[in-house]
Image (spheres, rainbow, N blue to C red):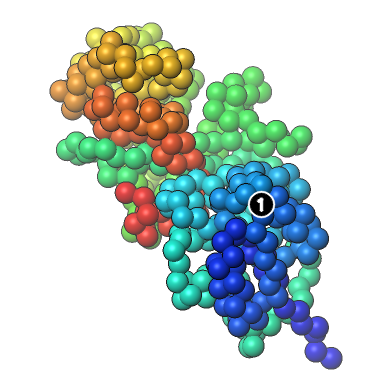
Amino acid sequence: MNAPTVKPTLLVADDEIEIGEIFQAVAEDLGFDVTCVTQGSEVVDMIERIKPDVVALDLRMPGADGVEIIRELGSKKCRASFILMSGLDQRTLTSVQSLGREANLEINNTMTKPMSVADIEATLSLYLTPKEENHVIQAAKPEAPAFDYGLKILYEPEFLFKAMENSAKHRLQVCAQWRRDDGSILAGLRFSNWGKEAGISKGLAEMVLTESLQTLHDWTTHNFSPEIAIHLDADFLADLSTPDVLSGMVDKFDVPRELLAIEIDESYVSNKKDSVNDVLTRLRIKGFRLSVFIQNEGEVILPMLDSLPVDQIVVDMSSLANKPNFLEDMETEFLYSSLTSVAKNKGITACATNVNTKDQFEFVQRCNFNSARGTQILSPGTAPTILPLYTDGKFA
């Protein structure tokens, strides 16, 4: 007896009726059963009612925008596959795609308007099983629930304004997070402090390094060899074996050492401990890149730049949120511009981080930073989402 067959179902959510009609015509030719909605407020209810296999979702709709819809569907553990559509730029689409994946939604494809019939057909065809003729799919067993707890590694792209000699063409910051049993996520300083309090910070760091280096190795096989930066805390800088341990790990994954950058806090180097200087110097000799994370305008680190074996300073720009008129503040601009100028004269690149608004993006350019990262540029994403941004030329 043949297994029962069902048509794949598609929900098209777009307030432009013409686009919905085009999608419907193409999808029905491919064998989809199609439903269209034009109001953002209708999307969640419709998904819960018809439970589509695929949802083509426009980011700008009346009633609710794409981010609001994705947030709600994530909380409802929606299992549909999503195609994001928008007339906005690809960076916006990719940012929303990352948000959706963080909400455990399956978002593997994006489409920028205007789009051709061929583009629509090619994208929808990805959701059809290749073995089926006449575009009919076999009824499948229910998908097993995913075990979505523990360590997760995201990568935050660094946008390059101006390169310096011997600086990396592409660089990504490793962002580790841990999902606890109650569903809450520990990231950034909370993740680091949790590891210290639990007495597992070195074990966590080894896990982060192992997964990140494996990803980097996999990327190099696709002709993508970015520099990745990993933050290490004071415990590692006080351990004289750290340079040898890191060298062994990197060599094990057959990755060039210059593709791994170690980021450290400004406070660690300002303490001037002999062990810290020893470890930093040996890391540099062994070929690793070094970055110093700075939280203020650099008044502490500036006098030390001559004696630090660093390649980059990373300046936290989140304090600008407390200065509503920073674009007109000549003193603030002078302080940051002086920092980047001194760094440049010493052959050190300057990266601005936590650049989360258009005004901050404009400001860091004005202050002559070499690069920047933050949500205004692109939110951190998983390894599978990062690779196409570079290999397809969508992020330069």
Quadrant of the drawing holding the N terminus: bottom right
Horizontal placement of 274 versus 69: left or right? left
What residue sits 66% from the left and 47% below the top?
63
Tag 1: amino acid: Gly
Residue most extreme to the bottom = 1
Above-or-below relation of 132 to 369: below
Q: Nearer the viewer, residue 385 or 292?
A: 385
Regarding residue 326, the answer to whether it shows in the image is yes
Above-or-below relation of 59 to 126: above
Horizontal placement of 83 versus 380: left or right? right
What residue sits 38% from the left and 45% below the top?
251
Label 1 sits on a secondary structure element that is helix
Instruction: Rate crowding at label 1 as few (under 14), some (14 to 19) or many (20 or more) other CA atoms within 10 Å.
Output: many
Q: Position of residue 96 (x, y in %)?
A: 54, 47
Q: Quadrant of residue 315?
A: top left
Q: Position of residue 270 (x, y in %)?
A: 36, 10
Q: Position of residue 79 (x, y in %)?
A: 71, 58
For label 1, the residue is: 40
Q: Position of residue 326 (x, y in %)?
A: 36, 17
What residue sits 48% from the left and 75% below the top?
117
What residue sits 60% from the left and 51% below the top?
61
Regarding residue 108, the answer to whether it shows in the image is no
